[in-house]
Image (cartoon, rainbow, N blue to C red):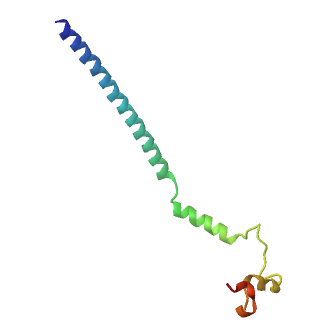
């Protein structure tokens, strides 16, 4: 008789822990659902990303970069020879491997 009562108490105690876990998990899922719904509402209110990208691109393309010098060509054409490489590969030993 005593063992039956103790088993019943254990089953009731384990049942309340199970209920508590289930209710805690349910609350967590409800919070996550609310968070996702709020995020979806914010996304609906936002502009399309492509429209924002087009606007930024048009602003960037129309304005010159303040860090770059405005030149239409090389300042000193003789400097180009240093970056083009040798015209006659047989005359330069640095390009022969």
Residue 5 is left or right of residue 82, and the answer is left
Residue 64 is left or right of residue 10, and the answer is right
Q: Quadrant of the N terminus?
A: top left
- Pick whichever, 86 or 46, lies toward us: 86
In the rendered image, the residue lying farthest to the top is 2
Examine the rendered structure and indicate whether residue 60 appears above or below residue 7.
below
Res 86 visible: yes
In the rendered image, the residue lying farthest to the left is 1
The quarter of the picture where residue 28 lies is: top left
Task: Give the residue displayed 73% in from the left and 70% down from the top.
Answer: 64
Task: Give the residue displayed 63% in from the left and 69% down from the top.
Answer: 58
Residue 69 is left or right of residue 54, and the answer is right
In the rendered image, the residue lying farthest to the front is 97
Q: How many marks?
A: 0
Res 73 visible: no
Percent x, y for residue 25? Answer: 36, 32
Percent x, y for residue 83? Answer: 74, 82
Percent x, y for residue 90? Answer: 72, 93
Task: Give the residue displayed 57% in from the left and 66% down from the top.
Answer: 54
Q: Quadrant of the C terminus?
A: bottom right
Percent x, y for residue 51? Answer: 54, 63
The quarter of the picture where residue 82 lies is: bottom right
Examine the rendered structure and indicate whether residue 15 appears above or below residue 37.
above
Examine the rendered structure and indicate whether residue 8 appears above or below residue 80.
above
Task: Give the residue displayed 34% in from the left and 27% down from the top.
Answer: 21
The quarter of the picture where residue 63 lies is: bottom right
């Amino acid at each position: 008789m005593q063992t039956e009562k103790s088993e019943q108490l254990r089953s009731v105690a384990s049942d309340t822990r199970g209920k508590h876990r289930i209710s805690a998990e349910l609350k967590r899922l409800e919070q996550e659902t609310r968070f996702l719904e709020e995020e979806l509402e914010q996304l609906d209110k936002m502009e399309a990303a492509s429209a924002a990208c087009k606007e930024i691109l048009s602003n960037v393309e129309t304005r010159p970069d303040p860090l770059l010098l405005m030149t239409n060509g090389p300042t000193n054409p003789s400097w180009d020879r240093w970056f083009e490489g040798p015209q006659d590969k047989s005359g330069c030993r640095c390009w022969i491997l």
